[in-house]
Image (cartoon, helix red, strand yellow):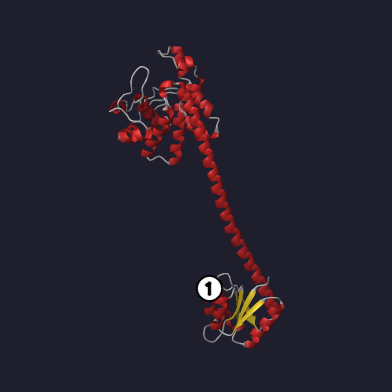
Amino acid sequence: MKATILTVDDEEMIRDLLVTALSREGYDCFQAGSADEARDVLLNNRVELALLDIMMPGTSGVDLLKEIKKISADTVVLMVTAISDMETAMRCIHLGADDYILKPFDIERVLLTIKNSLEKQRLLIENREYQANLEKKVLEQTGQIRSAMEELNLTYDHTLTTLVRALDAREKETGSHSERVMNYTILLAETMGIRAAEVAIMARGALLHDIGKIGVSDNILLKPAKLDEVEWRHMKQHPQMGYDILSGIKFLKAPAEVVYAHHERYDGTGYPKGLRGSEIPLGARIFSLVDTLDAMTSDRPYRRALPFSAVLAEVERCIGSQFDPSIAATFLSIPKDKWEKAGKRLFLD
């Protein structure tokens, strides 16, 4: 389908000449003898290209150019000018005109200029629409990928939680220990202002901290009496076994570091490596505090659950030895009801 062209010139003979030639080429044509007539055409019709005479009585072609670009920025505008007014023609280019045609003009050259200008504009519009559609598709696909990843992560988390519940059930007295320490870890890490992505890694590490116990026999794990030296040495291998299980899984490699170091102590007397201070991953230093909280407030075969006040006293006593002082300070600042809400259970007074 050919474009619609508006010819604006105060000389009727020039308008007729242009409209005749353009109509012969299959273009739909309008003509106007003044800027006022041109406005009526532009407001009531879609015009792909306008030919504007620069020198017209009343509103000049320059001013009409400005109006056209406000009405329809995509309309191609060619300025028609005498060679003596080239300076104004160049100024029009800066105002948004696409090209200019010199009087007296060769009609074949005018037709070629119009054809080339319309083709250039068509390509620009197509490219803009392509970019807009591409951005839309990218946004849509990004959303779909993000949704799929979130669903996949949720599936991972459900699978891991189910596995951990099975392991917790193996040690009958621990109940939902792993899920509670995960929730406690999230509360403490968020209170410390740690970024959400890091909190998620720490939470998974806390949830999976005892995964290595899958390699510990029931005779040792469930033994009601004190472990002997050989048994204890075997039990102390569970952080390494947990790390070996998880580190080969790409999305669990970072949580595996927490699993490996969850029995390290701030003063370097922990295991398996005897790491000290900041050598211990931050997630593991956080875990040591929340693990103490859950262990002390849970029933054990050898004692009943202790009150929350006993936990606070133990944390204060072990600052600098078992616990990182700065993390312990944040731990102590969190009120009991927040811990209870995170763990979904009440503590003894």
Quadrant (top left, top right, bottom left, bottom right) of the C terminus: top left
> Residue 177, image x and y in percent?
41, 27
The residue tagged 1 is 71
Residue drawn at the location 69% of the way across and 79% of the way down = 23
User: Compared to 229, does 305 lie above or below?
Assistant: below
Q: For this view, does 344 lie left or right of residue 244? A: left
Residue 329: give x, y in percent of width and height. 31, 34
The quadrant the N terminus occupies is: bottom right
* Any part of residue 183 in sight: yes
Q: Is mark 1 on a helix, strand or loop?
A: helix
* Residue drawn at x 40%, y 39% as measured from the top left: 194
Q: 189 or 136: nearer the eye?
A: 136
Please state if 208 lies on the left or on the right of 48 as rendered. left
Depth order, front residue of 329/344:
344
Q: Quadrant of residue 13?
A: bottom right
Identify residue type, mark 1. Ile
The quadrant where residue 41 appears: bottom right
Please report the residue visible at 59 percent of the width from the left and 61 percent of the height from the top.
Answer: 129
The image position of residue 86, as x and y in percent, is 58, 80
Q: Where is residue 98 in the image (x, y as percent from the top left)?
A: 60, 72
Question: In which quadrant of the rendered view does residue 173 lie?
Answer: top left
Above or below: residue 54 compared with residue 124: below
Locate residue 136 relative to residue 337 in the image: left or right.
right
Question: Which sits in the foreground, 114 or 16?
Answer: 16
Residue drawn at (37%, 20%), measured in percent from left and top?
300
Count of labels shown?
A: 1
Crowd class of label 1 (few under 14; some 14 to 19; many from 20; radius 10 Å)? few
Q: Can residue 266 be seen in this view?
A: no
